[in-house]
Amino acid sequence: METEAAHGVWPTNRKDETPGVADTNAGENAKTPETAEKPPSRILSGIQPTGRLHIGNYFGMMEPAIRLQDEGDAFYFIADYHALTTVHDPATMRENVAGVATDFLSAGLDPSKATFFRQSDVPEVAELSWFLSTVCPIGFLERAHSFKDKTARGIDATHGLFAYPVLMAADILVYDSNIVPVGKDQKQHLEITRDLAGKFNDRFGDGVFTIPEPRIAETGSTASVPGLDGQKMSKSYNNTLELFEEEKKTRKKIMKIVTDATAMEDPKPTEESTLLDYYRLFASDDEVAEMIASFKAGGTGYGHYKQQVFEKLWERFAPMRERREKLLADPDYVEDILRTGAKRARRLAQATLARVREATGIAGHPISLR
Ligand code: AMP
Ligand code: TRP
């Protein structure tokens, strides 16, 4: 915590270290007597270290997650086991993990409020994934959009990719999560998680798992942030606006946003305009209303609107860029945050695994090597 103060990046008032509140009671909401203080909701989400973060990630998942860190006991992690389904170079993996950690912290994840860690530092999640796979009908996985989309794009159809939703369910259930903020593309994974938790509870006893609720972000006027070409913004479509890219490159990308061929003097269509969608993410309601009025009036070229979008975006991320400069200068500090987070996360995961082992009659006495 001293290092945080030294950086002057966050306040140091971790609020939830009261023993027995956050760590041991979560997931037992049902058993809490009416009179007892309700434990805080556990909020959990993850992001894969598969490349640079973009504004789709930011508005779909990171920004809502950052807001929620004030409303409960937040757990956010870097899903490196998941990323292994597509990232096969160890140096790239390490670089991506460090990059996502630094960028999420720069964006406002506050380690004095949220527990931030690397998925693989809690190997219990892989063990839980096996338990869940024994209740998972193959049909759930065969119907999963993300498997179909990824294999259609040429990603190897491995067992890991196929079983991805089971590992994701383990991520969520191992921490007794109540709320999971994610983008719309993760909705089906959340449904699978809820189904698996229900099936497991039916077979081995009510209350083994807490059933989580998704919290799907509304990103401006659309359910997911469009890419520069108007499709969904995604690392794999090469159509992203990154959170932290050089000014010149960002400006250039915005200038390349696909628009229609309406002449400068003519009124512009306001439906399905990627430019307006972006402006809605960054500008106030009044500013958006002004731009819409100007679209309708005609007489202004798209280049002008693109410049306005660039300026708003650049201004919005300015404080984050500043924080990032400090964090980039101290990678050990970032690593330290992840390790501290993992210790806390692992304690919870071990308690869940003990419960699951007990409920299933599997090995009541794990052998200690010490
Ligand atoms: P991923 O990059 O697939 O690991 O996604 C990380 C998080 O960002 C997930 O919660 C996604 O749902 C969310 N996300 C990714 N792309 C978009 C997008 N274009 N619009 C909204 N949310 C997104
Ligand atoms: N599947 C998510 C994505 O691709 C990442 C993820 C893995 C996740 N485990 C999770 C998100 C658990 C929320 C909860 O974006």
Image: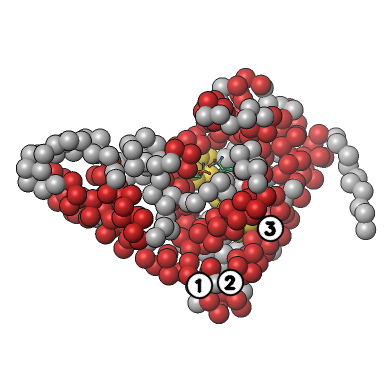
Helix, strand or loop at label 2? It is loop
* Left or right for 346, reference 300: right
Looking at the image, residue 69 lies above or below residue 181? below
Q: Position of residue 264 (x, y in %)?
A: 10, 43
Whether the residue carrying mark 3 lies under 8 Å from ligand 2 is answered with no
Tag 1–tag 2 contact (CB < 8 Å): yes
Q: Position of residue 285 (x, y in %)?
A: 22, 52
Residue 342 disc label: 3
Badge 1 or badge 3: first in the primary sequence: 1
Q: CA distance from mark 1 to mark 2?
A: 7 Å
Helix, strand or loop at label 1? It is helix
Mark 1 neighbour density, 10 Å: few (under 14) some (14–19) many (20 or more): some
Quarter of the figure that contains the C terminus = bottom right
Residue underneath mark 1: 326
Q: Amino acid at mark 2?
A: Asp
Can residue 119 be spotted in the picture? no
Looking at the image, residue 1 lies above or below residue 31? below
The residue lying at 50 percent from left, 77 percent from top is: 8
Quarter of the figure that contains the N terminus = bottom right
* Left or right for 310, reference 356: left
